[in-house]
Every structure is written in structure tokens, then in C-alpha cells.
Image (cartoon, grey):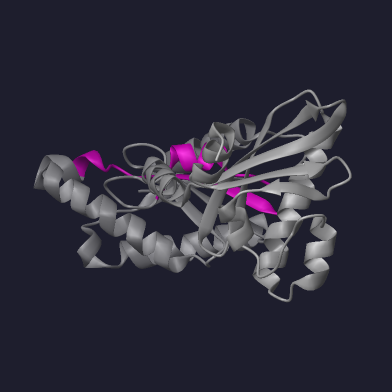
Amino acid sequence: MSLINQVLQSFPGLVAVKKITGEHVVVNESYKDFFPFDVHGLTLDNIIDKIEDKDVIDLLLQCKTNDAAVLGEPGKVTTSIETFLDTSFESVRYIMTDGGDEFMALLSWDITEKVKITDKLNARLQHDDLTCIANKTALMQRTFNNNNTVVYLDLDNFKRINDTFGHLKGDEMLKKFALYINNQLRDKDTIYRVGGDEFVVVFEDVGKVKVDERLTQIRNNIEQDEAFLGISFSFGLHAMSQDITLSGALESADKQLYASKQLRRSQR
């Protein structure tokens, strides 16, 4: 076996070379073993026609899309990720020339463990360590639409809790408050901790009036529950639209929050 063939067959993943028209001309053993029949001379469409497994078909459709991207930029090496069941593959594709003819080369390898580690790291980076809810990083990275209502809220006189009961009790109350609010939300609504005792709630498909009514009821319940040690909160809200950014919506909601807090203080 030539050195080139040894490299081809010992590569820890899948290797294939296809004509520009899509027919397979060279594959390594790992690539061969992925299919129950010989794929030489077959295109991905030919293989799809012979396969009944929907998961394999889904993988091949991903490959077709990524093949097309390479053909659209023939001078560029492209990297992509394809998934099959619980397995993730990182693939490199590029156009090569041999004897005046052009071919597409594919090298693909299993990166499932790397993806799992990355997902866990991202999950940790997007969650607050104290309350275990989503954090400001997650808020800034989410996608918004016109059906979102953004609420800025913070606890009233939370310093009293720390000064009276200590910071450990303060942390306990922050966790209790975050958990309570989270449990009152629907699955498609999300609460984020964005500061010490500051939170943002994003509601889906709920108008400002209904959001105001819901949060007022939640606040009344908290104020009447002795387990919350007299905690309450103020809030402001803003409905998202095409002409406003998240920063703009938060700024508007924060101004309403401040006005609400001042009003509530004057009424006590």
C-alpha cells in the first residue's frame, strides 16, 4: 500500500473524493462502512434514492447543502458541521485538480464530545451562578421579535434585607424570588438576572396591559407571603418593535421602572 493510501485509510474519520458532478470516485474504509452498498460512481441523490433510513437521508441532505456551498466558492476551503442522531461531524471541503479535471475532496471527523463540552460551557456562561436562571449574556444574545414585551424590574429596598439579616440571607432571598417569578411564567417567557437585584423578563405574545396585570398580581402575592420577608418590586415595560433595539427597549422600561418606584414610595 502506498503512503498516500495509508494516510487515506488511517484517517480517523470519513474521506471521499467526488467528481464536480457528484459521483464518488475515491472513499476510505470508514466512508464505505457507513453505507450498506458500494457508493463508487453514485451521487448523493443516487444514494438517497437507495436509502430508507430517514436519519441517514437527513445527513445526506445536509451534505448536499454543504457541497453546493463549496461549488459556489471553488477557490475556498469550507468548514461545516453535520449532525447524525446524537453525533456531530466537522467536515472540510475543497476543490482539487488532477490531470486537468476538478474534484471535490471531503474530510469529516467526529466532534461529538467537543460539541458537548462547548454546549455545557455555553450553558454555564449564559446562566447566573447564584439563581441558576438566565443571565445578561443570554439576554443580549437572544433574538427578539415584535411579539415580545420586555420588562425591567428590581427589588424595592433590598439593602434592608442584607443589612437586617446578612448577605447570606440576602442571597437566599434572591434565589427564592427568581425561582418564584420563573415558576409563574409560561414556558415561552424568560426571566434573566442582569444585576444584583435587577431582573429582566421577556414575554412572548402578550400585550402590555396583560403583562402589567400579571406582574401586579405576582407582586401582590409576594407582598402577602411572609416567607419573602417583606420583599416587593417595581417594574417598567416596553413592547418590542422594528424601530427599537433591545438597549432602547431596556432604557425605556428602566425609565418607567424608576417612575413607578418613585410613585410607590410617595404612596407609602
In the picture provided, is 79 more to the left or to the right than 223? right
Query: Which residue is found at the position 79% from the left and 23% from the top?
Result: 75
Query: Which residue is found at the position 41% from the left and 67% from the top?
Result: 183
Query: Which residue is found at the position 61% from the left and 49% from the top?
Result: 28
In the picture provided, is 98 more to the left or to the right than 116? right
Q: Nearer the viewer, residue 6 or 204?
A: 6
- Locate residue 155, reporting x and y percent: 35, 46
Is residue 236 visible in the rendered structure shown here? Answer: no
**Range shown magenta:** 134-160
Give the answer, above or below, for where 27 lies relative to 259: below
Q: Nearer the viewer, residue 202 or 79?
A: 79
Q: Find out whether residue 145 is within the magenta segment.
A: yes
Give the answer, above or below, for where 162 lies relative to 38: above
Q: Nearer the viewer, residue 238 or 44?
A: 44
- Locate residue 4, reporting x and y percent: 58, 33
Q: Quadrant of residue 31?
A: bottom right
- Locate residue 150, reporting x and y percent: 58, 47
Q: Which residue sits furthest front?
A: 1
Q: Quadrant of residue 266?
A: top left
- Locate residue 138, reporting x and y percent: 49, 42
Query: Which residue is found at the position 31% from the left and 38% from the top?
Result: 196
Q: Nearer the viewer, residue 245 or 221?
A: 245
